Image: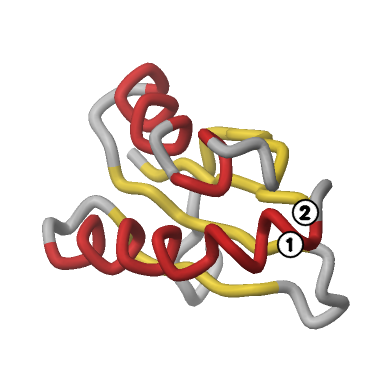
């Protein structure tokens, strides 16, 4: 199952400090097959991570362990996502 984490920056300075740890964390999860995509929003106000997990609880644990969430540099909104395959029927 796929889950989308919306990570809105609430503390720019703390976000700058924690960002390297955030990137290391996301890269590690990508290598484990637990993150399928991630990236910043072009408005500079945050970013998005797409997790692959067996349950909402498992995805929530991954998202809550992200250093930008732990350090309260960003808020977290997590939602299950049903990705569509193309062409649409």
Is label 2 in a helix, a strand or a loop? strand
Which corner quadrant of the image does residue 2 belong to? top left
List the single residue furthest toward the top: 57
Residue 37 % position (x, y): 42, 68
Residue 36 % position (x, y): 33, 64
Which corner quadrant of the image does residue 69 belong to? top right
List the single residue furthest toward the left: 32
Identity of the residue drawn at 40% across and 60% down = 21
Identity of the residue drawn at 47% across and 31% down = 64
User: Label 1 belongs to which residue?
Assistant: 46
User: Label 2 belongs to which residue?
Assistant: 9
Residue contact at pointers 2 and 1, CB within 8 angstroms: yes
Residue 30 lies left or right of residue 40; in this view the side is left
Relative to 80, say whether 17 is above or below: below
Of the pair 15 and 37, the residue shown nearer to us: 15
Marks 2 and 1, how far apart at CA: 5 Å
Is label 1 in a helix, a strand or a loop? strand
Identity of the residue drawn at 44% across and 59% down = 22
Describe the colour scheme in one phrase.
secondary structure
**Res 23 label:** none
Q: Quadrant of the N terminus?
A: top left
Relative to 61, say whether 19 is above or below: below
Of the pair 19 and 6, the residue shown nearer to us: 19
Relative to 8, say whether 48 is above or below: below
Residue 57 lies left or right of residue 75; in this view the side is left
Identity of the residue drawn at 32% across and 57% down = 25
Relative to 29, say whether 24 is above or below: below
Q: Alpha-carbon neighbours of circle 1 within 10 Å: few (<14), some, or many (≥20)?
A: some
Q: Alpha-carbon neighbours of circle 2 within 10 Å: few (<14), some, or many (≥20)?
A: many
């Amino acid at each position: 199952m796929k889950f989308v984490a919306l990570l809105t920056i609430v503390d720019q300075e703390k976000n700058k400090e924690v960002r390297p740890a955030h990137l290391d964390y996301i890269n590690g999860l990508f290598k484990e097959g637990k993150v399928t995509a991630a990236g910043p929003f072009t408005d500079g106000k945050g970013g998005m991570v797409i997790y692959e997990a067996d349950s909402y609880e498992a995805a929530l644990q991954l998202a809550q362990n992200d250093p930008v969430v732990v350090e309260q540099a960003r808020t977290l909104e997590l939602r299950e996502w049903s990705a569509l395959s193309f062409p649409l029927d």
